[in-house]
Image: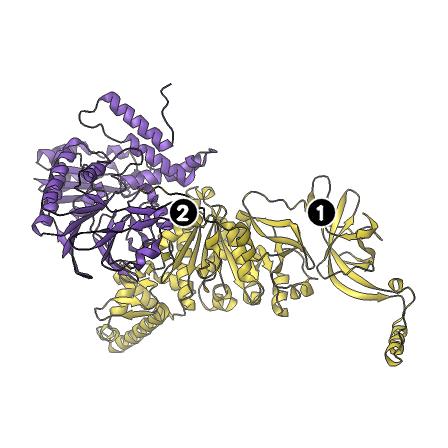
Amino acid sequence: MDEFSVVGQVVGGKFGDIIIRQKSGNDLEIGDLMVSEENGSFLILQVFSLEYGSQIQGKMQEMMSGVNLEQESNAQFYEPEFVNYVLARIKPLARVYKENCEVKIPKSLPSFFNKLRLISKDDLKFLQKEKDSIFVGYIRSGSKVIKEAEVWLPAEDVFSHHVLIPATTGRGKSNLVKTILWHVLDTNKVGALVLDAHDEYFGRQSVGLKDHPRAKDNLVYHTPSNPPVGANRLTINLQSIRPEHFEGIVDFSDPQFQAIRMAHRQSRSNWIRDLMLTDAVVAGMENTSQSRGEFAAATMMVVQRKLRLLLSLERDEEGVVFSRHEVFDSTTRGLTTVDDIVKDIEQGKVVVLDTSRLGNEAELLVGNIIASKLLQKYKDAKASGELDRKPVATIVIEEAPRVIGVDVLTSRNDNIYSIIAKEGRKFKVGLMAITQLSSVIPKTILANMNTKIILGNEMKQEREAIIASASQDLSEDDKNIASLDKGEAIITSIFVPFAMPIKIPLFEDIVKEKGSKAKPEKTKVF
Amino acid sequence: MKFAHLSDIHLGFQKHESLQKIEQQVFEKALDECISRKVDFILIPGDLFHVNIPEMRVQKFAFAKFRQVHEAGIPVYGVYGSHDFSPVSNSVIDLLVAIGYITKVTKVKNSDDGKIALDFLIDPKTGAKICGFSGLKVGRDIEYYEKLDRGSLEAESGFKIFLFHGGISDMKTEAGIEGDHMPLSLLPKNFDYYAGGHMHKWNHQSFDGYSNVVYPGTPFAGFHSDLEENSKGQKRGFVLVEFEDKIKDVSFVELENTSYEIIEIDANNRKADSINKELLEKTQGIDPGNKIVIIKIDGEMTSGKTSDVDISGIRESLYQREASAVEISKNRLTSLEYRITEAKGENKIEIETNVFSENIGQFRFKQKNLISDAGVALAKKLLSEFGQPKLENEKKSDYESRIRQDALGALGLKFDDS
């Protein structure tokens, strides 16, 4: 190590909280990564706190400041760089063995008085891209980005073990999800269902996943109205909906659920249409007991009202039930949509559903219908020994507490999302849950989310929930997480050797660099 | 003014003589109806023939009928379908075009710069503006639509018709074959009528920007499963459209074909003996005279082979009782003991596709065209080439040479005599 690259020296502390003195002329930042060369290996350490140090007593410093301020003199310390300095508190992240680039969790301190330097690309050679992995960003040391050190995560492991993306608004969630999905599109090793509540991923108006060179083969976009060229109309036939799809999504009372199940038993596939066309009062009066009949009529009216609001259903003059946002159909349209989407995911495609026109519950219901079928197919594949041939499937869900929040799961039955969070891993089906509120997700589910890509979060309670459930020890990283700027993140995962600080590139830059370019070539038309 | 819209006639599909007769009769009846109803023109968006070069018998009656239509002054506008087109050899459609009985509507203005610009063909009598694309196998025509310069087509004024051959996913009612459907959004907007081919059931729907997207369906049968649908009451015929500057009426002209009997057996959790017994009882309970008898056996037997289900005896007895044809579907019959079918499907093409898709993963090749979807497409293409029948009066050596060349063509190779 040449003297110019030295940024500090170990002067004290204990394991997990080592104190170094910053060399003058340097400007260490929270999150900076540094290296301590050891015998045959090196330690990677990270700054988690900065403070001043001085050889002069505090009273003396205060007095000297008084002289400067009150007498307008310019008194200075003799050899100030020796007298006053910055102390950084650092923690070891990893020990890398030079011989085989093996990375291990450090269990010892750096040598006392060892001089440290900032990390460089050569120290990160162990971050090699493996086959079928997903790019998430570049290693970041403080606010400095090491562009040569790309961070790739093993796709199958990461997605089947669930991914949590906690962040508050404006910290680059969409950019991160788009970046991940962009790389998912590279191969057919991962199938994804994306419930896109803001219609922002496909890139209808600007750049988006549609600009990927393999989008034609691997990206499927469904939107309810005016689909762009090549996109599908999102229409789901009411016949695809079964009573259990409402469980854990919609607040139906027990009698209401009984009414729904009864309607399903009576009319089978067309149960929603028939139920909506039933005259609730007449149906209620047909009952033998007057009081029970009134109750049934009232229940049915409530069920009809709830379904009408939830699915935006109307009835035209010819008695045809239709939905105002055109997503649900009671005739012959959309009969195969769910099967088609599941088939696409099974083929390793990314299926983006524009759910921006749907209400909150309707969006979750659509996801529920598809996710239920998907999980069932993967369970069947496991039973018949064919699961190995299927790509891992991930379901991207925004505002995840809507379905895996503690209040939802205690007040209602389990829904498909919580089932996937708990047991999906066995069947290669995972969740990619995006949330501002990690603290309302039960610990049992948070613990199952084995990869967390933590973006900036100013809410202490949320940071604490994330830190408590991280795969690596982030107990000293509270300030670090709070100070994450837009596009900066920390990855904590059982699939990375240490909590990695990363910088996620701008999606627009990725598209500019790698997006598809039209080739003007002649086409033979028969 | 009015025009007729027929599609998926699949002339030459039927192998059984009595069914061939019905196939011919239905075709002739359809065109006779067009003549007697004095339509201004006829649209046929593909799969007029079941193969690109059908046997001479089929060509003979087809040419004779189109000559009649031609002499009646009715133009026929069409595109190739996925069955009657071959990229490596000619199609009998080309002969019909060459002698002026059919006019192909695909007029390409330019396709050099990564875009395909189409020109309209204008029907001289009605002024209707017509254009469209042929359908290629396994959805390869999707590239046409992706590159289509749709702005000029959409902006064109007047009464416009677009011909296409392919499934539209927005109108799909059953699973179907992989790659067989494309989204409606690929078609250019603002046409008055979209004349579709490829889907075998009558379907007429309108969407935002796409009014009157219509499939007449096959007038008789182009798949074995069509006969089954017929036996269950599926209407067959063609579409008659009245128009001025806009569509006035779209109606379906039903054509009777023949009478049917269907026998369905659920083989789930049963043995061959019990299935055979039920088959016998059910066939004895019908009058098969001059009818097409469909026997469908579905499900998973608990033991034995699927071949233990005695079909040949039943078939023979039905023919003795003067059934005009006996069609037996055991595609979805499996046995727990002998699992011989790994992939299921509704019809032959679907089964072939699914079997290839299921098994392609076992192969490891560096050549990308031999694996995954491309591999499945290639395998299907090869199988289809090998399945071409020998033509009447074709020498065995000529037949072998033709099949060899077609197969090599499918593989993108050339035969080297040396």
Q: Position of residue A205 (x, y in %)?
A: 45, 62
- The answer to whether residue A43 is above or below residue A73 is above
Q: In this view, does B263 lie to the left or right of B144?
A: left
The residue shown at (63%, 62%) is A468
Q: Name the residue under label 1.
A: A123
The residues bearing labels 1 and 2 have C-alpha atoms spaced at a distance of 46 Å
- The picture quadrant where one finds residue A507 is bottom right
Is residue A77 visible from the viewing direction of this image?
yes
Tag 2, which secondary structure?
loop
Going by the picture, which residue comes out furthest to the bottom? A70
Q: Position of residue B5 (x, y in %)?
A: 18, 50
Q: Mark 2 points at which residue?
A: B114
Q: Chain A is drawn in which colour?
A: yellow
From the image, which quarter does the N terminus of chain B lie in? Answer: bottom left
User: What type is the residue that disc 2 sits on?
Assistant: Gly
User: Is the residue marked by circle 1 packed among few (<14), some (14-19), or many (20+) residues within 10 Å?
Assistant: some
Q: Position of residue A352 (x, y in %)?
A: 43, 57
In terms of depth relative to the viewer, which is nearer, A276 or B92?
B92
In terms of depth relative to the viewer, which is nearer, B131 or A175?
B131
In terms of depth relative to the viewer, which is nearer, A337 or B66?
B66
The residue shown at (33%, 35%) is B381
Tag 1, which secondary structure?
helix
Going by the picture, which residue comes out furthest to the top? B418
Mark 1–mark 2 contact, CB under 8 Å? no
In terms of depth relative to the viewer, which is nearer, A304 or B46?
B46
Q: Where is residue A437 in the image (x, y as percent from the top left)?
A: 56, 67
